[in-house]
Image (tube, grey):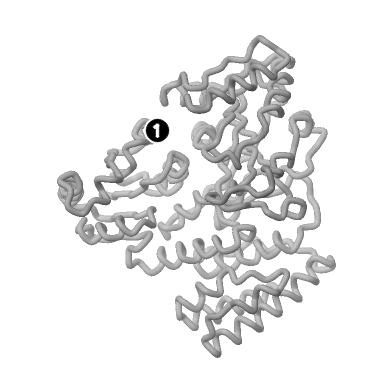
Amino acid sequence: MKILIIQLAKIGDILQSRKLISSYASHEVHLLHNSIFTEFAEQMDLTRLIPVNLDQLQTDNSTERAEILSTLRAEKYDLVVNLNSHDFISNILPELNASACIGFNSGDEYSENWLRFIMSFLKSRKLSGFNLMDIYGWVNKDYHPVKLGEIKIPASPEKVVIQLGTRNIKRQWSIAEYAVLTDWFVKQGAKVFLTGTAAEKEMSCELLKTSSVKFNIIDMTGKTSVPALFNLIENSDLLISGDTGTMHIGAFFEVPTIALFLGPAFPHETLSDSAVVTFPDSNIYDCYPCKEQDGCPFELKCRAFTSAIKIIEFIQDTETDNWYYSTSDSAGQLLKAYKQAEPDETSLMREVYRYIAKAELLNCIINDKLNIDKSTENYRNLAFSTERELQILKHLIVNKIKDFKFLNSLKYLKPLYLNYLLEKNSSDFVNNAIRIIESVF
């Protein structure tokens, strides 16, 4: 069987596609990808890479576009998997003459319903409970998540890699705090390697000026080729990074990683599976997670969500508050707290929506029940708000009303999947969703 996977996004997305790619391991798999990331894609175990220039592919009458389509048609693919939501990709899908197609705009009911449901979480990201790797994975209905192993953060690493920069300043932690952390590692006997692009050189220079130690800090910013970066990370004991492609390279090599997520970066969506993570408490920073494209009106205040001292305490196993690690269930990757605490309404509702997707969209065998203490005040509040949601949902279905303005006044209620249910126009699905909510509460 010959399969084409269309993945034209950034390096992190390519690496996050590996779970889907691995589910087709016994077949011939080709990857259509953005030529900018060819060096990264070459590190993947794939039968063939097909790099394309996005500008050329989007130009309807270009010679290059015609040549690309001719090449793809000649392969006579048995299956095309489209992981890209852009309209220009959906326009070329029929021209590939593949035997079957799944994913965005493919006409395949299962994969389109799954992706539409997941995209509805963009309306309220705080309730998102699915990692991007499993979103991609479940486009293939035969995908079965692998149980994740326990992550061990070394207490005395000898070789530490720190990725200072991210693609968005709002995702970037304080350089001054990174300097304190770097000093501590060096004083513990470690060598610290700073990585990043040439454009991020200013950050490494700032760290070196701020640092109190002047040895065993090796600045590799802008100096590594892609294979050299892979080799550096593969042979390290610990990686520290924000939500970047570098973090996913660490997962590719199963390197223990401390991930710092802030701004628009949300670990429920994009945390790699070899990482532990800390991120802002949305009860304190109610603006988190924010939108990628918006400016910050709060002077990047969520940068203060943690400190180098708290990270050091975590490494020394003396502080575990607000730290999470990747685990998995029958639907794939999710986060679990190191320190057990009573969940708030947001985290409880996140579990409910995940449960609905597991039962109705993914057709998982539900063998893991929601672990909710029904005696808590948070549960009672959630049960009350969910009952209101259930009544509203039934009302909307009966009256086919699609105006959700009046829902905004409800404190714990977000119309996450209501649009999805109504647009799908499937009474069986709606009734099943209602049944699940009623069975949980």
Name which residue type carries label 1.
Phe
- Compare residues 254 and 304 and report the one nearer the observer: 304
Residue at image position (56%, 56%) is 130
Q: Report the front residue among 328 and 241.
A: 241
Quadrant assignment for the C terminus: bottom right
Residue 29 seen in the figure = no
Q: Position of residue 425 (x, y in %)?
A: 45, 80
Q: Is residue 140 above or below residue 41?
A: below
The residue singled out by tag 1 in the image is: 40
Q: Residue furthest top?
A: 215
Image quadrant where residue 314 sits: top right
Left or right: 61 as drawn, with respect to 149: left
* Residue 394 located left or right of residue 380: left
At mark 1, the secondary structure is: helix
Question: Total number of numbered labels?
Answer: 1
Q: At 61% across and 33% down in the image, what residue appears?
A: 257
